[in-house]
Image (spheres, grey):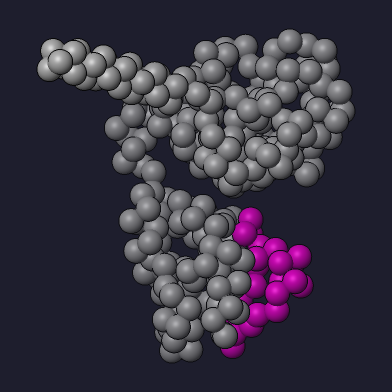
Amino acid sequence: MRKKEEGNMKKVSVAVVIALFLVTLLNLTSPVGAEDYPLRAKYPTVKPIETNELTAAYGKAIIIDSRNSAEYDVIQIANAKNILAGKMTEADLLKLRPKNDSAPLVFYCNGITCAKSYKAAEDAVKWGFQSVQCYDAGIFAWAKANPDKTKFYGKVLTAAELQAALISDSQFKSVLLPPKEFISRSKSGEYTVIDIRDPNERSETQFSLLNMKVMSFDTAVDLIKKRSKAIPTSKVLFVDNVGKQVQWLQYYLKQAGFTNYFFAEGGVLKLKKEGF
């Protein structure tokens, strides 16, 4: 009787091992879950492409960066064309390839929560282009996997150089000010305050501070690159709409040697939410 029970236990153990193996194999081979890419369900006509797939197709794919030129100039997939989503036309794509060409037409932007690449790919599909895909992992996932096929300020760097050049989360967070602190410093008279939102964002959410300068993100980038006196090289506060554009502004500030600058954490929307 005891031998029979031991035999049954061995059978159960083997079954458990096999079950665990199958679960592990399923996890390794299953496609990325929708929760990892929250915008995929919103754009069902857009076919995604994974990093390894785009790497394999890199030589023949036509890759389009759907971000604005200021972001593209900082870091881009090498050989990618820059056509801003929303301003891209059917004629722009026809200059790159015919609609029925089999070469992958791949759009990308900043990452899984960036909708620009989805919107651009959706337009391409609507216009009748074939083999359209969206690389929704974004530029930083690509740069990590393919530093040799990435340009930073127009140059291909080594993996170590690129890692050192990219601004880390901790470096970005070190210049973020919570709303109360941002308002306190803005009222001290020691800092120049600059609103870099676009006109549509300003019209949607009214926000003003005494002696605050107003300019577009692109204008701010241009002035920083020129080291114009319109933007001091230190003691300056920047605010955008939701705290996203300032992440790119920091690259230009760093490149130009600016110091002692800070950003409003969460942008104007968080300032308004907390009663400022």
Q: Residue furthest front?
A: 1
Q: Quadrant of residue 61?
A: top right
Image: magenta residue range:
197-219
1 drawn magenta: no
Q: Is residue 216 above or below residue 112?
A: below
Q: Is residue 78 visible?
A: no
Q: Quadrant of residue 220?
A: bottom right
What residue do we see at 49% from left, 55% from top?
A: 247
Question: Quarter of the image containing the N terminus?
Answer: top left
Q: Is residue 220 visible?
A: yes
Of the pair 182 and 74, the residue shown nearer to us: 182
211 drawn magenta: yes
What residue do we see at 86% from left, 23% from top?
A: 128
What residue do we see at 49% from left, 71% from top?
A: 264
Of the pair 41 and 154, the residue shown nearer to us: 41
Q: Is residue 142 above or below residue 53?
A: below
What residue do we see at 48% from left, 30% from top?
A: 142
Q: Is residue 272 above or below residue 232?
A: below
Could you say where residue 249 lies in the image, as x and y percent from the top left?
51, 56
Q: Quadrant of residue 66?
A: top right
**In the figure, is residue 190 to the left or right of 102?**
left
Could you say where residue 217 lies in the image, as x and y percent from the top left?
62, 59
Could you say where residue 109 lies in the image, as x and y percent from the top left?
60, 39
Number of numbered discs on residues:
0
Of the pair 271 and 94, the residue shown nearer to us: 271
Could you say where residue 53 lies in the image, as x and y percent from the top left?
54, 18
